[in-house]
Image: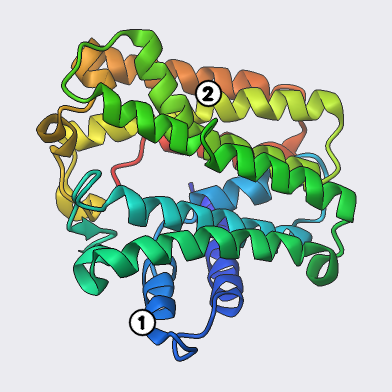
């Protein structure tokens, strides 16, 4: 765990600096919009998606220092999704990462615009990768396509739409899996595949890391469902019990807590199987797979 803690701390610090530099300054006009963007992006969050970018790049023998802009862009996309997810028209949450949500501080209209602006700024940062980090234009285009699909209607937003439409409705395993693999898993998948592409992954490596990503995303969301049901709100930095309150479809609701925990552990086993052909350069990804079902926050 100390290896993971050290790697995580270094990566989070690096991504924080890149984000602070890449985002518009808080005093740039219109100030309130830029303040709102920085409020939800800086000074909080686990930076897990950024770490997955760097871990995938390292696993295929790539230069992790060139992945910093990509890692920052993925975190901007994630922050954008959280702002929108917390809005009254969606999950109506008033607490995120231990502080008031964006719309509570800045109002709904500015929160919507801040989320939109973060999404577009993420792709601006990706477009800067050839000049800032020496990433080839060809690889940059492939990464842009990966993240656009992961964040769009065939990824995160599609999962969010089905999640909304399924609330308080009978739910089967296929629908629940669709929600989780898209709403949560799609951005993990895009982050890992993009990091691998930047690192120069071959076809077999990319396919293996894609399998890892899909099982990782499912393990993460099952655990998230469990934590919402039985977790500590103070540790999580957000209210618990929201899924039940909103009538959301979750793994504990469909399978019960014990079976859900077992399914999360099964997902981790699949993650580790996907990494069998990799050297110790993939150790960070192995550590993260174990962490994801042990976390309490």
Identified at 13% across, 30% down, the residue is 244
Q: Is residue 105 above or below residue 4?
A: below
**Residue 65 in view of the camera:** no
User: Residue at 49% of width from left, 56% of height from top?
Assistant: 47
Query: Where is residue 206 drawn, in percent x and y?
Result: 76, 30
Circle 1: element type: helix
Query: Label 1 neighbourhood size at 10 Å, few (<14), some (14-19), many (20+)?
Result: some
Residue 172 visible at all: yes
Q: Which residue is mark 1?
A: 32
Element carrying mark 2:
helix
98 relative position to 71: left or right: left
**Residue sitting farthest toward the front:** 109
Looking at the image, tell me whether mark 1 or mark 2 is earlier in sequence order: 1
Labelled pair 1, 2 in contact (Cβ < 8 Å): no
Residue 128 in percent (x, y) is at 76, 67
Between 54 and 105, the one lying in front of the other is 105
Q: Nearer the viewer, mark 1 or mark 2?
A: 1
Residue 40 picture location, percent across and down? 37, 66
- At 43% from the left and 74% from the top, the residue drawn is 38
Q: Residue at x 45, y 91 (%)?
A: 27
Q: How is the image coloured?
A: rainbow
Q: Which residue is mark 2?
A: 215
């Amino acid at each position: 765990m100390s290896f993971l803690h050290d790697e995580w701390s270094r990566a989070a610090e690096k991504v924080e600096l890149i984000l602070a530099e890449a985002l518009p300054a808080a005093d740039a006009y219109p100030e309130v919009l830029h303040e709102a963007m920085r409020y939800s992006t800086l000074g909080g969050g686990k930076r897990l998606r950024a770490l997955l970018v760097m871990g995938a790049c390292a696993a295929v023998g790539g230069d992790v220092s060139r992945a910093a802009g990509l890692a920052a862009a993925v975190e901007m996309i994630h922050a954008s999704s959280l702002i929108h997810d917390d809005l009254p028209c969606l999950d109506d949450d008033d607490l995120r990462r231990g502080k008031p949500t964006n719309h509570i501080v800045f109002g709904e209209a500015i929160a919507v615009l801040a989320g939109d602006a973060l999404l577009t700024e993420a792709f601006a940062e990706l477009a800067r990768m050839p000049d800032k980090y020496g990433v080839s234009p060809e690889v940059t285009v492939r990464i842009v396509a990966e993240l656009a699909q992961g964040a769009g209607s065939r990824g995160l937003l599609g999962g969010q739409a089905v999640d909304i439409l399924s609330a308080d409705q009978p739910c089967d395993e296929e629908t629940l899996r669709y929600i989780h693999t898209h709403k949560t898993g799609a951005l993990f998948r895009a982050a890992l595949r993009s990091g691998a592409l930047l690192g120069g992954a071959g076809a077999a490596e990319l396919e293996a890391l894609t399998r890892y990503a899909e099982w990782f995303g499912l393990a993460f969301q099952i655990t998230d469902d469990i934590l919402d049901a039985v977790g500590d709100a103070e540790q999580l930095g957000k209210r618990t019990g929201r899924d039940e309150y909103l009538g959301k479809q979750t793994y504990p609701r469909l399978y019960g807590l014990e079976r859900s925990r077992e399914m999360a552990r099964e997902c981790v086993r699949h993650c580790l199987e996907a990494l069998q052909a990799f050297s110790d350069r993939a150790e960070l990804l192995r550590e993260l797979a174990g962490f994801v079902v042990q976390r309490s926050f």
